[in-house]
Image: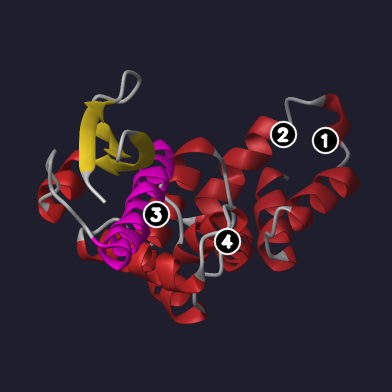
Amino acid sequence: MKISDIKQQVKRSDRYSIYVDGKYSFPLGESELLNTGIKVGKVYSKMELDLLKERAVVDKGYDRTLNLIIRRPRSEWELRDYLKHKDYSLEATDVILNKLSERGFVDDADFARRWVDSRRLLKSTSKRRLTQELRQKRISDEIISLTLENDIADEQEILRELISRKRKQSKYNDNQKLMQYLVRQGYNYGDIKSVLNEES
C-alpha cells in the first residue's frame, strides 16, 4: 500500500489529506504529518497503515479538543465527556488528554482558579454557589477547597453590592423576597441578616 498523494486541506491549511493507492484514506495535522515521516511514494503494510490510521484518530481528537479549550477552559471531566460523546475510545481519550496535559492544557487546579476569577468578574457569586458549580464540573473537593481558600474576595462586601443592585428592582424592596433570592444564590442566612440589618 503506497502513499499516492498528500494534499493540504482547503479549509484548514494546517491539516492534510492522505491518499493511499489513489484513494483518500485519512487526515493528519501538520505536526503529526512530520512526526510520522509520511511522504508520497512510501509503502506500508496493512498493519502499519492501520497504526497510522489510529494515530490519525487521536490527532483529530486532539485537534478538536484543543479547539474546544481555546473557546473557554474546560475541566478534565468536561473533556472526557466531550470525547465520549464524539465516540472516542477510552484508550484514545487517555492518549489525547495525556498529550493535552503535557502541554498544560488540562489542569483542574488552573481551571478552578480561572472559573472563580471569571465568576467574580461577571457576577456576585457566593462561595457556596462556586463550590456547587465546580462540583458540577467534577472538580475534586480538595482542589475546590484550596481554590476558595486562596480567593481573596470579601463575601460580605460582594453580598452588600448584590443587595444594593437588587434593591433597584421594586420586587426586591420586599425583604422576604430578597432573602429568598439570596439564599438561592448560596449566601448564608446569618450573613444575609447581618448585611440587611446594616440598612436600618
Residue denoted by label 3: 57
Q: Earlier in the sequence, mark 2 or mark 3?
A: 3
Residue denoted by label 2: 166
Left/right placement of residue 182 relative to residue 106 reads right
- For badge 2, the amino acid type reads Lys
Q: Work out how far the residue at label 4 is from the one at label 2, CA to CA, in angstroms.
A: 41 Å
Residue 52 lies in magenta, yes or no?
Answer: yes
> Which residue: 21% across, 65% down?
102
Q: Mark 2 falls on what kind of element?
A: helix
Number of on-image labels: 4
- For badge 3, the amino acid type reads Val
- For badge 1, the amino acid type reads Tyr
> Which residue: 74% across, 51% down?
182
Marks 3/4 in contact by CB < 8 Å: the verdict is: no
Magenta stretch bounds: 45-72
Q: Earlier in the sequence, mark 3 or mark 4?
A: 3
Residue denoted by label 4: 84
- The mark lying in front, picked from 3 and 4, is 3
Q: Work out how far the residue at label 1 is from the one at label 4, CA to CA, in angstroms.
A: 44 Å
Q: Earlier in the sequence, mark 3 or mark 1?
A: 3
Residue denoted by label 1: 172
Q: Earlier in the sequence, mark 4 or mark 2?
A: 4
Q: Mark 4 falls on what kind of element?
A: helix
- The mark lying in front, picked from 1 and 4, is 4
Marks 1/2 in contact by CB < 8 Å: the verdict is: yes
